[in-house]
Image (cartoon, rainbow, N blue to C red):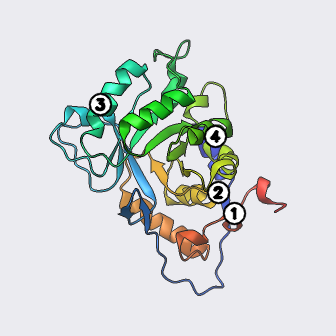
Amino acid sequence: MLERDIAALESYQLIPRVLHDVHEVSTQTHVLSQSLSAPIIPLIKTNTSKLELSSLSLVDADLLLEQTSMSLEIAIPLLKPDKMGSLMPKVRKLAARNIAALALDFTQLAETPPFGNQVWKPKTREDLAELRAAAGCPLWIYGIASSADAVVAMEAGLEAIIVHSGAGLYLEGPAAIEIFPEVFDTVAGMIDVYAGGPVRNGIDIFRYLAVGAEAVIVDTDRPLANLQAELEYAMRLTACETLADIGYEAIFAPMFEEL
């Protein structure tokens, strides 16, 4: 986990309400035409001998390419940044397997020299448009950390971005929840905006939803059912009957004091 992200999350405090008539809450939503019991999408990077998916998931693309017989209707392959000549064949192979969407992982650009061994392979607006055309399905970016990049993704015709602070790890860039409101205000309504910061529990998921996230990509070993139960708990104690009720008014943070 990124300590900066966790510290920032903790500064967004939920405001409990007890004088209301909310008894049952609903966390149901839809992403890519898939019905989800909660706005929680797991990130799967671990190599296993038999990968089994029960819900829409973001999965390391190399794992999926190894398992050629597996149905990928609820899998969103996550591709590492690479030169276009290496990316395009992978994109075409995955597109031929009826994938729901495709995602590019830009958080790994932080691990380039002198802080890591990854090859520096950023992408331009034109590169993204070319990859989107080859994919023939929605293209997401995992690792947006600025509103300027969000605009480029939108102009390239991408369908969704995932705000994540990973690319700014060694720059001491802003935490995901700190940059999220600005990114959301810049492109919301024109492109889907999800959160991909660290999550410890369903309370953290509520925090991301409160600043505008439509869903949260979670990188955790905790059961999704537990995260959903904690999210429902937070909704009951803040008088939010549905996901549409979760907003800035449910949280207290210094930046919202004057609103």
The residue at which mark 4 appears reads as: 151
Task: Pick out the residue farthest to the top.
Answer: 114
Q: Calculate the distance from the C-alpha at mark 2 to the C-alpha at mark 3.
A: 33 Å
Amino acid residing under circle 4 = Val
Residue 167, image x and y in percent?
57, 30
10 Å crowding of disc 1: few (<14), some (14-19), many (20+):
some
Of helix, strand and loop, which one carries label 1? Answer: helix
Q: Of callouts 1 and 2, which one flags the residue occurring earlier in the amino acid sequence?
A: 2
10 Å crowding of disc 3: few (<14), some (14-19), many (20+):
some
Check contact, mark 1 vs mark 2: CB within 8 A: yes
Q: Of callouts 4 and 1, which one flags the residue occurring earlier in the amino acid sequence?
A: 4
Label count reads 4
Q: Calculate the distance from the C-alpha at mark 1 to the C-alpha at mark 3.
A: 38 Å
Q: Which mark is residue 16?
A: none
Q: Is residue 4 visible?
A: no
Of helix, strand and loop, which one carries label 2? Answer: loop
| Residue depth check, mark 4 versus mark 3: number of the one nearer the observer | 4
Amino acid residing under circle 3 = Asp
Q: Of callouts 1 and 3, which one flags the residue occurring earlier in the amino acid sequence?
A: 3
Q: Calculate the distance from the C-alpha at mark 2 to the C-alpha at mark 4.
A: 19 Å
Relative to 15, is 75 on the left or the right?
left
Q: Residue 62 carries which label?
A: 3
Of helix, strand and loop, which one carries label 3? Answer: helix
Check contact, mark 1 vs mark 3: CB within 8 A: no
The residue at which mark 1 appears reads as: 248
Q: Calculate the distance from the C-alpha at mark 4 to the C-alpha at mark 3.
A: 28 Å
Q: Which mark is residue 211?
A: 2
Check contact, mark 4 vs mark 1: CB within 8 A: no
